Image (spheres, helix red, strand yellow):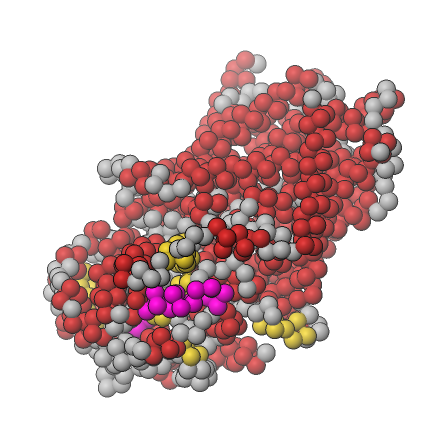
Amino acid sequence: MKKNINLKKISLIVFFSFVCFLFIIPFYWMVVSSFKPSGEIFTSQLNLFPKEPILANYINLFKTPFVKWYLNSLIFAGGYVFLGLFLCSLAAFAFSKYDFKYKNIIFIVIVAAQMLPIHIQIIPLFIMLNKTSLVNTYTGLVLPMIANPMGLFFARQYMIGIEDDILNAARVDGASEWQIFYKIALPISRPMLAALAILFSIEAWNNLLWPLIVMRTEKMFTLTVGLSSLIGQYRPQYGLLMAGSFLAVLPIVLFFLKMQEHFISGLTAGSIKG
Amino acid sequence: MKRKLLILCLICTLVISVSFILSGCSAGNKEGSKESASSDSAVELEMWTFVNAHADYYKKKAKEFNDLHPEFDFKLKTQTYPYDQMHDKLNIALQTGIGGPDISDIEIGKFPGIVANNKEGLVDLTSTVDKYRDEIVEARVTPYSSNGRVYGIPTHLGTGVMYYNKELFEKAGVSPESIKTWEDFIKVGKKLTKDTNGDGKIDQWMTGVPTSDFMTFNVMSNQLGSNVFDKDENIILNRPENVKVLKYMQDLVHKYKIANPIPLYDDQNVYRDLNDGKYAAVLAMPQWYMIRFTEFMPDLEGKVLVRGLPSWGNEGTRSSTGGGTGTAIMATTEHQEIAKEFLEYAKLTKEAGVEMWTELGFDPIRKDAYDNPKLYEPIPFFNNEKVMETISELQSEIQPLYLSGLYAKARDIINQEVLFNAIENNKDPKKLLDEATKELKEEKAK
Amino acid sequence: MIRKILNDKKKAPWLFIAPFLLLFTVFKVGPILYSIFLSFYKMKGLNGGEFVGLNNYVDLFHDSNFIKAVVNNTKYMIGTMITLIPLPLIFAVLLDSKHCKGKTIYKAILFIPSLTSLVIAAAVFKILLYEGETGIVNSLLGLIGIPAQKWLISPGLAIPAVLLIATWRWTGINMIYFTTGLTGISKEMYEAAAIDGANMLQRFYHITLPLLKPVIIFVATLNLIGGYQLFTEVYMLWNAGASPDNGALTLAVYLYKTAFSYFKLGYASTIGLVMGLIILILTLVQLKFTGFFKDEV
C-alpha cells in the first residue's frame, strides 16, 4: 500500500514536471532574452543562455515611466476586480437563488451581449466616454468593463450549487435577503470569488485594445500599452519588452497563487459547505 | 464592518453610474476645455508615430525649430504606439473627430484608405509642398496625394536595391557585379545554390521569395512602371508587366530552383537564416532594409553588399521604390500654421534631407541633399562602402506609385492569395492576377 | 426603504441585479444598438452614410471570405473543445489529489502563459514552429518519424498552429475554473466510494464529472464564444492576421480589417452582428442540450 502511494507520488511528479517543462519554454526564453542585446535575440534557435548577460534592458526600462504604468495597471485591475466581483456576484445570487419575472430572458440577453465582438462596440463607447469627459481617466477605463456577462455567468454557475436549505434556515432565523447574500452566500462562494478575481485581473492585465483607446497620455498608460509603445515597427526594442514583461508577470503570478490558497484554506477552515 | 463596506460599495456603484448617465446628458466636453485652460503661453503639439527613432528625430527638430523661431514658443509631445495600434487609434480619432493628435505619421499602406474616407480629417498640405516641388522627388509625393491635393509629407525615397552576402559570393567565385540583368541573376544563382554539408538537401539558396508580403513584387514591378493602380485609380494588377514579375518570382522557386519560399523578409526566422548565411541575396527590397541588417544580423557585419536592382533587359529601369510613411496634420488641430511650418522645417528643408540619412538612416527625398558629403561616408557594416553612392545612382528614373482607397484590400489579396498560390502552390500567375483584379473590380463597384 | 426591499424575497432580486443591469444597459446595450443601426448603412467615415437596407446582410452571404472565416472558426472551436476541456480537467483532478506534491509550483507554471505578453509568446512560437527541419516542433516530430511540416505557411496547418498556442495560453485558466469546482466536492464522498471498492476511473466518472457539470458547461460555453471570437493569436502569429491563403482568417480578424483597414463600418457591424448571432444560437443549443435552464446541479 505504502509503496503504491509512493509510486503514485513519483509518477505525478514526473508527469507534472514534464508538462511544466513544456509550458515554461516561452517564458524561459523571455527571461533569458531580457538579458541579451536585441541583435542577439533572434540570431540562433532558442539559445538557452545569453553569451554575455547584460542588464542594459532593465536599466533602460526604468528610464521609461514603467513604475507609473505598473501602478496604473494595478489600479485598473484592482478597480475592475473589486467592483466587478461585487456586481457580478450580487447579480448572480439573484439569478441563481430567486425566481422573478423575465429571469431567464434577462439572463440570456446579458450573456448574448457577450457574443458580440468588442470591435464593433469601441467607436460608440469612445464617443460616450468623450461626451462624459471620461477619456483618459481611471473611471472611464474601469466603468464600462465591470458589468461582465461572463463573470455573471460563472458566478451563477457556482452559486447554483449552494444548497437552498442553508439559505432557508437563515431566513427562518430572521435574516434579511441582503444578510443571506453577504453572510452566507458570499463566504460559501470564496473559491469562486478567488477564481473570478484571478480571471478579472488577467483580463485587465492583458487588455491592450481598451486602455489604448481610453488612455491618451503616457502617464495614464497601463503596462500593456506602455510596454507595447516600446516596440516601434522598424526598430523593435525586444529586449526591453522582454525585461518589462518579465517584471510584470512574476509578482502577479505569486500574488494570485497566494490569494487562491488563502481563499481555499479559509473555506475549509470554516467548513461551511457540506 | 463588512456589512457597511458592502453597502458602501453598492451605493458607490449606483452613484457612479447615475452620475455617469447624468453627466452624459449635460455633455460638456470638459477634457477639451481643461487642456486649453491648463496650458501656459507655450503651444503644445502632440505627434503620434509608430517608430521610436522617428519620435526622437522630431523631438530634436522641434528643439532646433524653437531656437530658430522663438515667436512660436511651441512644444512637441511625441507619442509612439505600435504600428497597428497607432493606426487604429488614429482611425477612431479621425472617424469620430475627437481625441486625435495634431500631427501624425501614417504608413503608406494606411494612407490611401484614410484619404479616401476621411479626407476632411486631414489638413491640405499642397501649398507647403508646392514650395519644394523642384527639390524633392515628385514620385514620392503621389502616394500621399489625391486629385492633385497633397495630404502627407513623405519621409524617404525607399530606393529598391539588392543585398548580397559577399562571403558566399567569394566562396562561389562569382562577383555580384556580374549581375546586370534578372537573367544574370538566375545564372549566378545556380552557382550559389548548393548543398554545403553533403546531406543531399540544399541548404544554401540564392535567395528567398516572399509568399505573404508584396514588397519585393512591388519593387520589381515598379521597375517596369507598373503596379496595382494607374494614375486614375484604375486597377491594372493583371497587366503583362505584373504577370511577368510574378512569373519570374515563381520561376526562381519552381523552374530554376534557386530560391526558397519565405513568408516575408521582415520576419525573425528570416533574419536568423540570413544571418546564418542560408541566403546569398535579399531579393529586391527598399533601402530601409539596411537597418534590419545592422539591428538583427550582427554576424553579417562587413559582409553585406548593397547593389542596384538587375534590369529587365530593354524594358523598364533599374530604379524603383517601396514602402513609406507620410506625415499628416489633423484638421482638428488648433495650431495648423505652426504645425505646417514645423513639418516643413523638419521634413522638407535641405538640412532635414541630410539628417534623414544621418539621424534615421533613410535615403532622403530632397535631391540636393545628395550633394552633402555626409551621405557618402563609408559604412563598416556594409563592406566599408559608400552605400549612398550606389543608391543615389539608382534614383534618376523612379516611377511614381499610385494608390487608391482600395489599396489596403489590394495589398491583402496579393499578400494572402496571389503570392502564396503563385510561389508556394505554383499556380498560373496570369490566372491569379486576373482573379485578383476581378475581385478588386467587384469591390470597387460596390 | 431599501431595508424593506432587502427583506422582501420578491423585490430583493431586482435590487440585486439593478447595478449590474444599469451599467450593462449603458455600456453594452447602447453600443450594440448603435451597431445594429450602422449595419443598415453604407458608411463613409462616421458622418456620411447611405441607407442600404438589408444589402450588407445579403452581401455577407455571398462573401467567400466570410464563409471561409466561419469554417475556420468552427474548426478552431471544435479543436478547443477537444483540447481545452479534457487537459485542464485532468490537470485539475490530478492536482487535487492528496498525493500530489508541489502543487503551488505546478499551478504557477501552468498559469504563467496567460500572463505572458502575447507579443513575446508569438515571437517564441514563431521560432518553435519554424518550417525548416531544424525547427523545434519539426525536430520533435522527426523523432517519431513525421516529416517536417510548414507550420505557419500551409493553410491547412494554420488552425492547428493557433490551437497549439491557445492550449498553451488557456490551459492554466481553465484549470483554475475546474479547481474551483473541485473544492466544492467533499473528500468524504471519494473516501466512501473508495471503501465501496470504486476505482479511480469509476470515482472520476460517477462523482467528479457529474458534480463538475456546471463548471464544464461554463468552460464549454467559454470555448464556444472564445472559439468564434478568436483574434489576438492569429493577429500576432501572422503579420496583422495575414495568414497564407486565408488559412487562419477568422471572423474577428475579418471584421477588424473591414472596419479599420477598409473603412467599411456598416459592413463591419453586419459581420459583428451575424457573428454574435451564430454564437448565440450555438450557445443556446448547447445550453439547452446540457439542461442548463432546468436550474439543477
Left/right placement of residue B207 relative to residue A141 reads left
Front in this rendered view, residue B381 or C138: B381
Measuring from the top left, give residue C142's x and y in whole percent. Answer: 38, 47
Front in this rendered view, residue C276 or B114: B114
Measuring from the top left, give residue B360's x and y in whole percent. Answer: 26, 60
Front in this rendered view, residue A264 or A91: A91
Measuring from the top left, give residue A7's x and y in whole percent. Answer: 51, 20
Q: Quadrant of the C terminus of chain C?
A: top right
Magenta stretch bounds? B320-344
* Residue B293 seen anywhere in this rendered image of the structure: yes
Let me know if residue B336 is in the magenta part: yes
Q: Which residue sits furthest top? A: A2
- Residue at image location 44% in from the left, 48% down from the top: A218
Let me know if residue B445 is in the magenta part: no
Left/right placement of residue B412 relative to residue C198 reads left
Indicate whether B443 appears above or below B384. Answer: below
* Residue A242 seen anywhere in this rendered image of the structure: no
Indicate whether B122 appears above or below A8. Answer: below
